[in-house]
Amino acid sequence: MSDDKARISLAGSVSLGTGVMIGAGIFALVGQVAGLAGDWFPLAFLLGAIVAGASAYSYIRYSSVNPSSGGIAMLLKDAYGPGVIAGSFSLFMYVSMVVAESLLARTFGTYLLRSFGLQDSVVLVPLLGVIVIAAAAIVNLLGNRLVEASATTTAVAKILGIAVLAIAGIVGTAVAGDGLFAHASGDAPDVFGLLAGTTLCVLAYKGFTTITNQGDDIRDPKKNIARSIVISLAICAALYLLITISVASSIGAEGAADARDYALAQAAEPLFGSWGVGITVAIAVVATVSGLLASLYSVSRLYAMLQVMRQAPALPAKVHHQPLIITAGLAIVTTAFLDLTQIASMGALLYLTMDIAVQWGVIRHLREKIHAVRWLPVLTIVLDLAILIPFTILKIQDDPLTVVVAASVAAAIFIGQVVAVKARERSA
């Protein structure tokens, strides 16, 4: 009984999932998505929820049959065997999650400095990001009960805060402003841009995968992992739709794209003034910090499983808490050297590539074992490609460096796994 009480509850698991999702995704990505999708950026966030929901089916089915702290790494190992493919795509997932932590950290710095007009500082933004990652790592060292307690409290606070802010913005614009669609350009939707924008929106939902990494740390995991994922996705989809409609009503797609990394704070100013900006900044700080706490906990567990599977490098044995130290260290490096746009783009490219591998593994090797239907993983691959291809084309045209960096990281991972597998075979 005492052991069961020590495990994470359904509410705690949902809090950890939403804690990762309701962070940088909504606060940093709105402006970037608006720049790609134009007036239709709220629809892009809705489409992102559909893609994530379809994708989640395979993770739910696998975790319901085989709950594990390794989560996705175990799924890939079961699907492809303990070789280069499983190790490489597991590390794709790991790196995309580390990149997401950097997105949270950079967003924390950007919004905190917005109150002082320093949100574009090339020194202070990454510096604050590095500091908050280090602080979140220290909290994680104190144990998962503290992480769960803080996640539950902050999740409720930021969900209510964002909902109230969004609803107030929509009502205020409709009653006292120029109307909900006053800032719309009236242009026909750019389908290519809408699909590319949806790629970034998927990042705002991918935090559901952290729930699978909690594994049997959750009470009754075979039921509660699925429940946690579904509830988290539903909560986030509703909040994202509300807040993006509010932003569109306040400053429109053009205003959001101009503000870019701090669009939500900019959208609060016309209707609510400086106090609205202050509230938005406070919610963003709480959201990003709690997201980091939840993400570091989950991602370090994934790395620990990869070490056990001998698919990830280790530090000398005398170094304790290696997964957490390595994860936080990599997130700090990414935060220091990449901006928000580069971080988001690289994370999206790696994550969606990994997701295609997961869905194919379920179709080819795991469908009968986990009692999964075929059509949903097939649909997910189609959806992933439908948004990934336009996004990649646009990035090659506008930001080829990010594509080169992502491709280089992917190549380095594959080469590293080839070397690691050969070393394992020689020592066997």
Image (cartoon, rainbow, N blue to C red):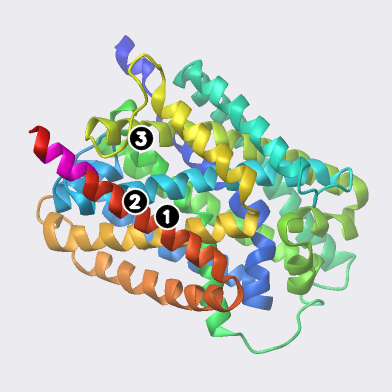
The residue tagged 1 is 409
Residue pointed to by mark 2: 413
Which of the two discs, 3 and 1, sits closer to the camera?
Answer: 1
Distance between the alpha carbons at the discs numbered 3 and 1: 17 Å
Quadrant including the C terminus:
top left
> Of the residues shown, which amino acid type is indicated by label 3?
Tyr
**Residue 226 percent coordinates (x, y):** 33, 44
Residue shown at the point (45%, 50%) measured from the top left: 96
272 sits to left or right of 83: right
Does the magenta stretch mainly form a helix, a strand or a loop?
helix
Q: How many marks?
A: 3
In whole angstroms, how far apart are the C-alphas of marks 1 and 2?
Answer: 6 Å
Q: Which mark is residue 102?
A: none
Q: Which residues are magenta?
A: 420-425
Residue identified by numbered label 3: 303
Residue type, mark 2 in image: Ile
Alpha-carbon neighbours of circle 1 within 10 Å: few (<14), some, or many (≥20)? Answer: some
Find residue 231 and report its horizontal and vertical position in percent. Answer: 44, 46
Q: Secondary structure at mark 1?
A: helix
283, above or below 193, in the image? above
